[in-house]
Amino acid sequence: MSDLSIQLHWQRAEPVLQTGRYSNAHTVQFNTTYDVQVDAAPGWGGDPGNTNPEQALASALSSCHMMTFLALAAKADWPVAGYHDHAVAYLGKNPKGQMSVTRIDLHPVVRFDTGFTIEDAELEKMHERAHRYCFIANTLADSVEINIL
């Protein structure tokens, strides 16, 4: 398998580490070249200008679903011209009463080359297959909903 790692860097800026009095802001580095500023979700005191882990999880799922969909569409000779998604992660309590991402909704919109049409039922079936084969979706189990627009 390939190296699927990241580097995470956090440094305390405050004199002491005290509950509610320190920053969670940190940097996640991908492939030693791309740094992303990450913080807690805004509802948990994070900077809304930074990415948060919940957004990153929604992004990972959305990207995986898209790449799986494109692979399946290519095999089916569907001329996909564009793909857009709006992924939303929801925070709440899981059945154990712990805070978690309780659901992620995907809202993919697929555009095809001019002149190509596909029945809504076939498009939905292809998204269901993409969800079934997506590595990230398989990791998350049942907390994903795909809303085709």
Image (cartoon, grey):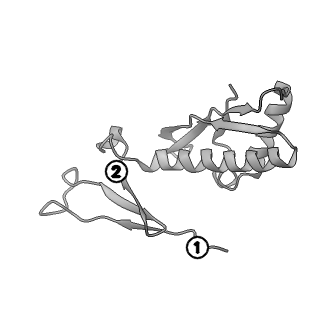
The amino acid type of the residue labelled 1 equals Asp
Residue 141 in sight from this viewpoint? no
Q: Residues within 10 Å of mark 2 (few under 14, many from 20)?
A: many
Q: Nearer the viewer, mark 2 or mark 1?
A: 1
Quarter of image, res 22: bottom left
The amino acid type of the residue labelled 2 equals Asp
Residue linked to disc 1: 3
Kind of element beneath mark 2: loop
Disc tally is 2
Instruction: Find residue 106 and report its horizontal and vertical position in percent.
Output: 62, 36
Residue that lies at the very extreme toward the left in this rendered image: 15
**Mark 2 or 1, nearer chain start:** 1
Residue 111 in sight from this viewpoint? yes
Name which residue lies at 60% across and 36% down. Answer: 85
In the image, is residue 38 above or below residue 12? above
User: Along the horizontal axis of the image, is 100 left or right of 72?
Assistant: left
Residue 143 marker: none
Residue linked to disc 2: 39
The quarter of the image holding the N terminus is bottom right
Name which residue lies at 28% across and 43% down. Answer: 45
In the image, is residue 28 above or below residue 53? below
Instruction: Find residue 47 and report its horizontal and vertical position in percent.
Output: 29, 43
User: Along the horizontal axis of the image, is 134 left or right of 42?
Assistant: right
Name which residue lies at 19% across and 58% down. Answer: 18
Task: Please name whichever residue, 40 or 121, is drawn nearer the observer in this view of the structure.
Answer: 121
